[in-house]
Image (cartoon, helix red, strand yellow):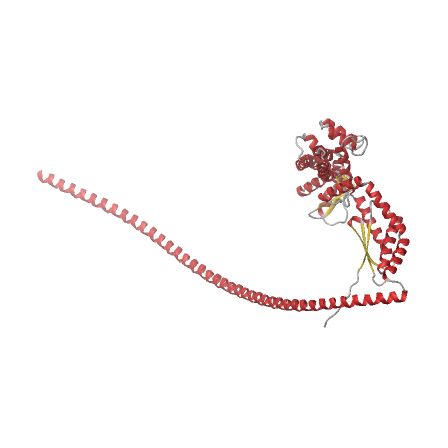
Amino acid sequence: MENTIVYLIIGAAFLLGLLVGWFTFSKGKKISTALQTEISAKESKLKEIDLKLSQAQSSARAVEAEARANAKEIISEAKIAANELTNKIQKEQARLEEKERSIDEKAKSIERDRVNLDNKQKEVEELKTELAEGAAKHRSALEQVSKLSEEEAKAQLSKELENEYAGFFAKQVKALREKMEVGVEEEAKDLLAQAMQRYASETATESTSTIVQLPSDDVKGKIIGKEGRNITAFEQATGVDIIIDDTPGAIIISGYDLARRYVAKLAMEKLVKDGRIQPARIEEIVTKMKEEVGKMMLEFGRRACEELNIPNYPQDLLKIIGRLRFRTSYGQNILKHSVEMAHIGRMLAEEIGADKQIVVEGCLLHDVGKALDHEVPGTHVEIGVEICNRFKVRPEVVHCVAAHHEDIPMASPEAFIVAAADAISGARPGARRESIESYFKRLKELEEVAKSFAGVSRAFAISAGREVRVYVDTVKIDDLAQEKLAKDIAEKIEKELTYPGVIKVNVIRERRIEGMAK
């Protein structure tokens, strides 16, 4: 029994040992398999890393080769640029050296000319002495031939000249007497002239059309639209005419009203840029541009008042003043004309002691009625007075507006100044288209009258037509004939031309003697 138990224990131990061994072997096999798998994965990663390293090395070698090539190219370009710069420096140095030689030669030439001039001056002095001696001998010979002394000859010549020019000198004396009688008027004219000279402004450019540039001629078809719908809608909305002709890349906006033309120009440029040109879009854009131009009018009025230092005008009045920026009179912009008048009027008021603020405001508002004269019945003076009264402008200023065309008697010095400034600004040469044409015509007529006389080589009208400068041929005209020519030209101008003021006739007889030293 005991042996049996022992055998059982030994068998159980053997079986237990077999089980432990099998379990240990199975677990070891699994661990070995896992290790092999992990080793294989790491070897694969190492191979991948080696491949990437090999690719990176190849790429680095390619980049290095490209960098070497670029470096060689840059070095080559730098050498070429350095050679060009060196050549340029050498050329500039050669040019400077040549210029220095030229300056040295000019200096030597100037010195030679100075020496020659000194010698010629000495010769002239000697000739003057010889001429004086010869004149004395000639005078003595004439006295012997004519049996008259120098004093007797002078007296006889004086008497003949007096008889010939008696009428001319009488007219001159009469003109001088009249000038003395109207001394106050001449002083006033001088005062106006000074004010005009102190203020200079631009000349007039009258135009009734505006050109709009197009990106291409293909846009003209869009502007016209199907059966002309777009162009008809645009003309109805803006009140202008659109002229589309063969002019490449441009159309013409025609109309007498500057404000409408400007609205049309802005609207057309906006439509062309947007590309959507159709009747509904045209009406929308034109409405927006009218609002924008209205803001511009307000800004123009505000700038004019700021320039003239006029404060506290309401915005509605400023907008009406700014509207004058889009009105012209014979090509002269009315807002610029009014501002120009205000500057001239202020100068005149300062000279004579008048109220310069009333004058400035009267000048600015004198034509304000022209801003609405197309929309409101009445003359521009009546409309301007009504506008001033509506915005409670000072009565003194309203009087200047009402009297500047002498519709009512002028009752203040300021009103006279406003009227005078209006005449100065409107009548100055270049201010208005009609005035400048008549001005040039008068200058041409003066020159033609002077050139019509024999012996006249050249004639120039200068000093705004108040002087004619006449150059005569010294061979055909002597000293005595020179005086007679001046009188004859003045008489012909009086008979044939109509002109303001006095025209001075200046006859110049110049003799030139040239010599050549070789």
All told, the count of numbered labels is: 0
Provide residue 54's location: percent of width, then percent of height. 40, 58
Q: Is residue 9 visible?
A: yes
Provide residue 370's location: percent of width, then percent of height. 77, 34
Look at the image and tell me in which quarter the N terminus lies: top left
Left or right: where 58 falls relative to 414: left
Examine the rendered structure and indicate whether residue 48 appears above or below residue 84. Answer: above
Provide residue 419's location: percent of width, then percent of height. 77, 36
Provide residue 37's location: percent of width, then percent of height. 32, 50
325 or 14, which is in the foreground?
325
Which residue is farthest left? 2
179 or 500, which is in the foreground?
179
Look at the image and tell me in which quarter the C terminus lies: bottom right
Left or right: where 346 falls relative to 88: right
69 or 270, which is in the foreground?
270
Which residue is farthest bottom? 518
Residue 8 position by quadrant: top left
Q: Is residue 253 visible?
A: no
Residue 514 position by quadrant: bottom right
**What residue lies at 79% left-to-right and 46% top-to-bottom?**
436
**What residue lies at 43% left-to-right and 58% top-to-bottom?**
59
